[in-house]
Image: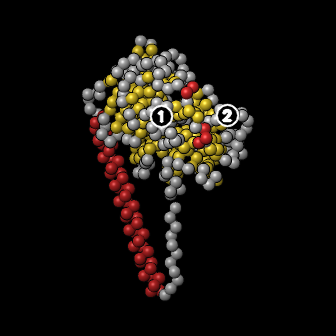
Amino acid sequence: MSIEKKLREGSVHCKRRNNRVHRRMEKRQKNRKKWIYWGAATIFAVMLSVLLGLLMKKDPPPVLVPGAIVDSAVTAITADASDISYLQREAKIQYNSINDPYKYGDDIVFSSTAGSASYTRMVVYQTDLEESYTIPAKVKYNNLTGMVMNEKYIVYLDASTGGGGRICSYNRNTEEFDIIKEYAYAMPKLCLYGEYLAFLQQAGENTDRLYIYHLETGESVTPKVFEGSAAQTGGIHLDGTTLTYAVTYYEDDILMSRVTTLDLTTGAEQNYDWSRLVYSPQKNGNYIAFLSSASGVADDIYLSENGGQPQLLVSDVTNMKIGDDFLAYTKGDVVYAYVFETGKSYRLNTTVSKGLLASVSGKSVCWYDVTSYDDVDIVKYANMEW
């Protein structure tokens, strides 16, 4: 928030001169801001025009089918995971109810109750100061949830328990709120990278739309519309300027998925069909991780390097999220991390505690301590070192 400096008291001539200078400075600042926003909007418009132009080409990109998925866990063995629980820290949050904690840098954003069963209070906990402060978010519906954050923005869902809601953003520098989009069906999963937000929105019983939204200018584009989606896909993932998502379809009554990576700057698109249902594909560098299963619930993690044949990483997980050069997951009340380049696994919570992964950002992992199921939520975190 900018704070205007008060002009010193002086002669009438001095006041008038200072007022003229002050007005000139304000005008220059406004013009400078206009040029900055105009430049950002122009860059975004050019990027989107290139993207849409390339996507409208008639020839579809080739589908790579590198081979059947390997269903034997040869990459990671959690029993041999190194214990690095000494890195864990507890967020000393003075709230009993903590919903969707998301850690970025030294801050953890979450929602909490405010005298009712609904999560209508937005809170930021500062791990370095061990202090919390509330953000006066305007709540139209029942719950604030699905929050993601970086150094400049907090983006979240204002969701109704009866279905539907809206996507909102908060500028941490200007302290301004914006309504990005209303939605009528299932809650979209938000992915934030820099000034860009990506999400899939259900637009009908069998229609999904892919949105890319520029938070700085408020401009958005819909590069893809999916008709006849057969099942939920777990949302999309934004790694720099690369989008990764899956589209489901039926083949001989068997549910399959096609994974796509889309470069937003060039429009280059690559498809992969691994003859399997793929849920929640996420990309980091040369690696694509996703949830799948040979049969039943998608609770096995598979990993593909450079688009090659995926291999089973670990079975029977509760959830999975990708970070910088690693992925984290929950298995048997334990939070693990797997490092791509070394193939090593690490245990993050202690052997006498139970954990449930909550969020991953950069090299930070945040989880719930669920050792005791009482009325108090306990959040712990670790900044990865290996």
Image coordinates of residue 173 in percent, x first then y, are 50, 57
Q: Which residue is mark 1?
A: 339
At label 1, counting other C-alpha atoms closer than 10 Å, the crowd grade (few under 14, some 14-19, many 20 or more) is some
Residue in front for this viewpoint, 337 or 48: 337
Location of residue 363 with respect to 34 vertically, above or below: above
Amino acid on which disc 1 is placed: Val
Residue in front for this viewpoint, 150 or 129: 129
Asked if one can make out residue 282 in the rendered structure from this viewpoint, the answer is no
Residue in front for this viewpoint, 253 or 63: 63
| Residue at the right extreme, as displayed | 374
Q: Which residue is mark 2?
A: 353
Image coordinates of residue 82 in percent, x first then y, are 56, 33
Lateral position of residue 30 relative to residue 356, left or right: left
Residue that appears at 32% across and 51% down: 42
Asked if one can make out residue 88 in the rendered structure from this viewpoint, the answer is yes
Image mark for residue 59: none
Q: Give the image's coloring scheme.
A: secondary structure
Residue that appears at 60% across and 50% down: 127
Image coordinates of residue 132 in percent, x first then y, are 64, 52
Alpha-carbon span between mark 1 and mark 2 = 23 Å
Image coordinates of residue 59 in percent, x first then y, are 26, 28
Amino acid on which disc 2 is placed: Ser
Location of residue 106 with respect to 328 vertically, above or below: below
Location of residue 183 with respect to 105 vertically, above or below: above
Q: In which quarter of the view is residue 26 placed?
A: bottom left
Query: Along the polypeptide, which appears first: circle 1 or circle 2?
Result: 1
